[in-house]
Image (cartoon, rainbow, N blue to C red):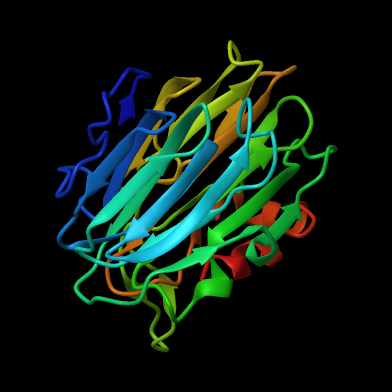
Amino acid sequence: MHIPPHDNGNRAIVDVDNELVPLNYFNIVKLRAGETFDYTLPGYETCIVPATGTVDVDVDGAKFPDLGHRGEDVWDGDPEGVYAPVGAPVRLTCKSERAEIFVAGAKFDQVLEPFDVRVPELDLVQYGSDDTKTHRKIKHILGANQHGKVGRLLVSELFTVGAGGWSGFPSHKHDTDRWDVAGEMIESRHDETYNFRFKPSHGSGLQMLQREDNAPGDAYHIMDGSTICIDKGYHPCCVLPGYQMYYFTILGGLSQRSLKQYFQPTHADQLHTIPGIMDMVAKFK
């Protein structure tokens, strides 16, 4: 499902128990200097990531000052985040002239401890190649480095490298928990939500969604600020030549945090043509 860019007025874009992606939550909060925003989210753990600007974060009395240092856009520096446990009261206070803050969530039933993730603690991956039009960087905010401290939530930022190209290829899905005859998990159920940005901002791209291997699927024209919710199916995306693409990624697992991707059989041989892709797979834990 494509949710077009709009002014959400600091109200959830993907609310709790969403019909399509019930394991996800997503809000974009925009504040000016000195303004505050409070939330409490029973049943969901969350991660606060400033897209731009700087905020102080208070999680039930635990204080995390000066989070985020990006200026004009998401290309202007590295992300930082704060993990907030299920049901914790959270207050965001804007320290910069303006701030745009992503709030990502996943359904969970236990209360853990809050913590922050600063730039030195990011888990960085770069893979693909210009030749295969798959060159990209991933900045994991809640990734493998935070395994054991988080319940079901994975949060990352993905950037195309260069101008134009594909992401999420070879096509994969993760819409059901299933195992092979030997008892090894071959796919995990993870709902997924993206928010896209383009540079320059008038750029755009395409999100494909193929429900079954070799069957016709759907395609969505994505623009700066578009949100995509993915409940099932293979889902590669691409950006027009001459533009850079970014997307903020939220994954919420049904039974586990580690993501087990199932690669589309028709295109599985492409795994051997894209440099570093197995490194990428290993980082979604």
Q: In screen coordinates, is 30 left or right of 64?
A: left
Q: Viewer-proximal residue, 280 or 269?
A: 280
- Where residue 151 appears, as percent x and y from the top left, is 34, 73
At x 49%, y 38%, the residue is: 95
Relative side of 115 to 12, left or right: right
The residue furthest bottom is 182
| Res 217 seen here | no
Residue 282, image quadrant: bottom right
Give the image quarter of residue 246: top right
Furthest residue in direction right, as rendered: 131
Q: In this view, does 164 lie above or below 139?
A: above
Q: Of residues 142 and 236, which is closer to you in this image?
A: 142
Percent x, y of residue 80: 56, 53
- Position of the N terminus, as image quadrant, is top left
Residue depicted at 49% across the width and 55% down the height: 65
The residue at 75%/53% (across/down) is 126
Say whether residue 267 is visible: yes
Q: In this view, does 44 lie to the left or right of 222?
A: left
Left or right: 90 with respect to 75?
A: left
| Residue 14 coordinates in the image, percent (x, y) | 25, 39
Q: Where is residue 64 in the image (x, y as percent from the top left)?
A: 46, 60
On screen, residue 4 above or below 195: above
Residue 272 picture quarter? bottom right
Residue 188 against residue 27 in the figure, above or below: below
